[in-house]
Image: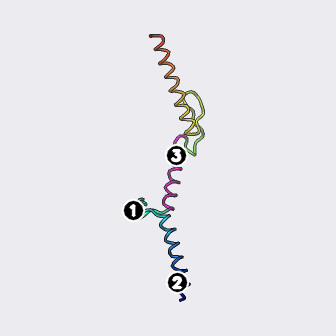
């Protein structure tokens, strides 16, 4: 084997090891307690997204309704509904304070 070929193969191995080191973490483990790799991370993210997709409205159900009759199809809408309810509570407390104050 020529010296040039040996250097090329060493450079290729160096590049391959750099890519592997970038895509694996000794600080994160997969379900088998092996060093996690990018596929494990993508799988974990996909599982988390699936769980959040059903957080308010299950995917196999239509939109829900809140206590005020509003349609809830997302977590954002649900939080907005909670916020509106908190404002109503604050307003009622303020009204009582002014009346009794």
Q: Do the residues labelled 2 and 3 touch (CB within 8 Å)?
A: no
Q: Quadrant of the C terminus?
A: top left
Give the percent coordinates (x, y) of residue 21: 47, 66
Is residue 60 toward the left or the right of residue 25 in the image? right
Q: Is 62 part of what is drawn in magenta? A: no
**Element on which disc 2 rests:** helix
**Element on which disc 1 rests:** loop
In the picture of the structure, the residue carrying the numbered disc 2 is: 6
Give the percent coordinates (x, y) of residue 10: 51, 79
**Element on which disc 3 rests:** helix
Q: Callout 2: 10 Å neighbours few (<14), some, many (20+)?
A: few
Q: Which label sits on residue 69? A: none
In the picture of the structure, the residue carrying the numbered disc 3 is: 52
Q: Are marks 3 and 1 in contact (CB under 8 Å)?
A: no
In the picture of the structure, the residue carrying the numbered disc 1 is: 33
Question: By what rule are the colours in the image chosen?
Answer: rainbow
Q: Callout 3: 10 Å neighbours few (<14), some, many (20+)?
A: some
The magenta region covers: 38-56
């Amino acid at each position: 084997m020529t010296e040039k070929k040996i250097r090329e193969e060493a450079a290729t191995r160096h590049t391959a090891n750099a890519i592997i080191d970038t895509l694996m973490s000794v600080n994160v483990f997969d379900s088998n307690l092996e060093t996690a790799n990018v596929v494990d991370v993508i799988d974990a993210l996909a599982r988390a997204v699936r769980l959040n997709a059903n957080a308010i409205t299950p995917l196999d159900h239509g939109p829900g309704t809140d206590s005020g009759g509003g349609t809830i199809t997302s977590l954002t809408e649900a939080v907005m509904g909670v916020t509106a309810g908190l404002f109503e509570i604050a307003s009622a407390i303020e009204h009582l304070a002014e009346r009794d104050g």
